[in-house]
Amino acid sequence: MTATKEPRRRPGGRTARTTEAVHGAVLALIAEGGAARVQVPDVAERSGVHASTIYRRWGSSVSLVLDVALDRLGAAAEVPATGSLRGDLLAYARRTLAATEGPEGFALLHAVVSACDLTGKSEGAGMKHLHRRGTEIQAMLDRHPGDGPTLEDVLDGVLAPVYLRVLFNAGGMDDAHVEKLVDRLLLTGG
């Protein structure tokens, strides 16, 4: 009997370098002209990755922008334990705001919202993103058991106002406003 040898994984190998180059090119193109500016041939030229590789891996420019959005917004949602619920909520809200600010953040958040299947027939990538954020928020809340806000309270009281102001370019969302949202949430208990 011959043992099957598993392929050796290379952290930071060619796949990681390709992803990094392509994601960097997408972000640069978004910064220059929004998500509509992202076309596979432009990404290929800017990243040095052949267009056929990009098509094979991501399929389309829409999928590519969504992949970058999920990667960036997901990384921004990771919050270290600060030792207090208020500190954790502030860190989470600040990271979320930073990840969604400006034209790049708007384009990434818009890509996630566009990937939601609002018919309820299937769970698109956008809804999966929201579920992951919910899991992260719940883990944060579980570190501080007691009579605090619920997941729904945090979604409605902190995350929704940030996303709403970004998506509608309503402005006025700065660190002081984020603190006010968190303090209001904690004061009312939800």
Image (tube, helix red, strand yellow):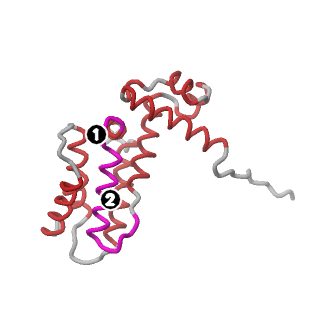
Residue depicted at x 44% and y 35%: 27
**Residue type beneath disc 1:** Leu
Task: Name the residue at the bottom extreme.
Answer: 146
Q: Which residues are magenta?
A: 80-104
Quadrant where the C terminus sits is bottom left
Quadrant where the N terminus sits is bottom right
Structural distance between the alpha carbons of marks 1 and 2: 26 Å
Q: Position of residue 145 (x, y in %)?
A: 29, 77
Which secondary structure, mark 1? loop
Task: Name the residue at the left extreme.
Answer: 188
Whether the magenta-drawn stretch holds residue 109 is answered as: no
The main secondary structure of the magenta stretch is helix
Residue depicted at x 40% and y 65%: 80
Residue 61 marker? none
Q: Say above or below: 12 vs 84.
A: above
Q: Say above or below: 107 vs 84.
A: above
**Residue type beneath disc 2:** Tyr
Crowding near pointer 2: few (<14 within 10 Å), some, many (20+)? many
Which secondary structure, mark 2? helix
Residue depicted at x 29% and y 49%: 97
Residue depicted at x 18% and y 68%: 186
| Residue 133 is at least partly visible in this image | yes
Q: Which of the two discs, 1 and 2, labels the residue nearer the N terminus?
A: 2
Residue 118 marker? 1
Whether the magenta-drawn stretch holds residue 102 is answered as: yes
Task: Name the residue at the right extreme.
Answer: 1
Residue 92 marker? 2
Q: Position of residue 189 (x, y in %)?
A: 16, 69
Q: Position of residue 107 (x, y in %)?
A: 34, 35
- 63 relative position to 95: left or right: right
